[in-house]
Image: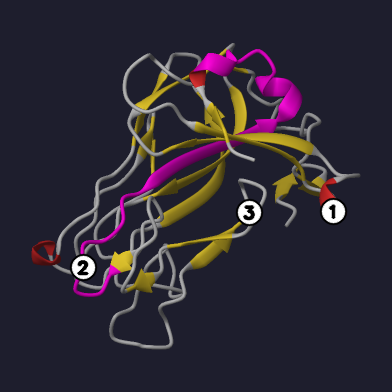
Amino acid sequence: MSIHVKTAAGWQVLGPGELPGLGGWAEITSVWDGSGAKPNRYAYNDGPGGSGGFDWVAFEWTDDGELRTDAGGLMDALLVSGGNGAGGAGLAHRTTLNATQAPMTVTVSISLPIAAGAFTSVASFLGPFNSGSGRVYGGAGSTLGGNMNDSSNRVGVTYDITGTDKVYGEVSGSPKPNSGDGGISTDGAAGVVIVRVPAAQAAGVDPNEYVDVP
């Protein structure tokens, strides 16, 4: 799925080039501060059959950490709040943001038990940006998922920021790890923080700082 951004020149596909009026992509230089779990890395081409499109690299944090860039710039991001055990799914915020030049702290939200109540959620953070929290019956930031009062409205939202479609903010009896899923009579799932840049903008990251996911 292509991401389109409205600029002074009209709607444009979000690709490796610089976007008029918005600037260029961030160059990621570090994704792990030496503590906690290393983020996962996904490297892929978004063209049909994995060729002919844009080459991307996505980093996925399932634990708190840190992100550093050379001098700020654009990043494609998905920030997902944790779900709870009373049928409330976490909010999912997909956006293109301007990274700060200073190191950005990554905070991945925890899951919540049944006792927390269906209207409770904890946001995930990437520096000053967050996934949102609060009333989460609507799940995934919309009416598409997480509504425990509507059995047809529990499907969550699907994003392919890591190269394959994944569902976030679903209501389920078996919440998926780090999906923001809301649990049915079981604890919800923790959230996640994911950023994506053109592959060339992450070429300098030390391979010892991440775990490659095929």
Q: Position of residue 178 (x, y in %)?
A: 38, 50
What kind of element bears circle 3? loop
What kind of element bears circle 1? helix
Q: Is residue 140 above or below residue 155?
A: above
Q: CA distance from mark 1 to mark 2?
A: 38 Å
Horizontally, residue 3 falls left or right of residue 109, namely: right
Mark 1 neighbour class, 10 Å CA radius: few under 14, some 14 to 19, many 20 or more:
few
User: Could you tell me if the residues under marks 2 and 3 are in contact, i.e. CB atoms within 8 Å?
Assistant: no
Q: Is residue 76 above or below residue 98?
A: below
**Tag 3 or tag 1, which sits nearer the N-term?**
1
Mark 2 neighbour class, 10 Å CA radius: few under 14, some 14 to 19, many 20 or more:
some
Range of residues picked out in magenta? 183-208
What residue did someone put label 2 on? Answer: 186
What kind of element bears circle 2? loop
| 195 magenta-colored | yes
User: Could you tell me if the residues under marks 1 and 3 are in contact, i.e. CB atoms within 8 Å?
Assistant: no
Q: Position of residue 39 (x, y in %)?
A: 47, 30
Three-letter residue code for mark 3: Asp
User: Could you tell me if the residues under marks 1 and 2 are in contact, i.e. CB atoms within 8 Å?
Assistant: no
**Residue 49 tag number:** 1
Looking at the rendered image, the disc whose residue lies closer to the viewer, 2 or 3, is 2
**Residue 17 tag number:** none
Considering every residue shown, the one lying at the far left of the view is: 115
- Whether residue 68 is visible, yes or no, is no
What residue did someone put label 3 on? Answer: 160
**Tag 3 or tag 2, which sits nearer the N-term?**
3
Three-letter residue code for mark 2: Thr
Horizontally, residue 33 falls left or right of residue 21, namely: left
- Whether residue 158 is visible, yes or no, is yes
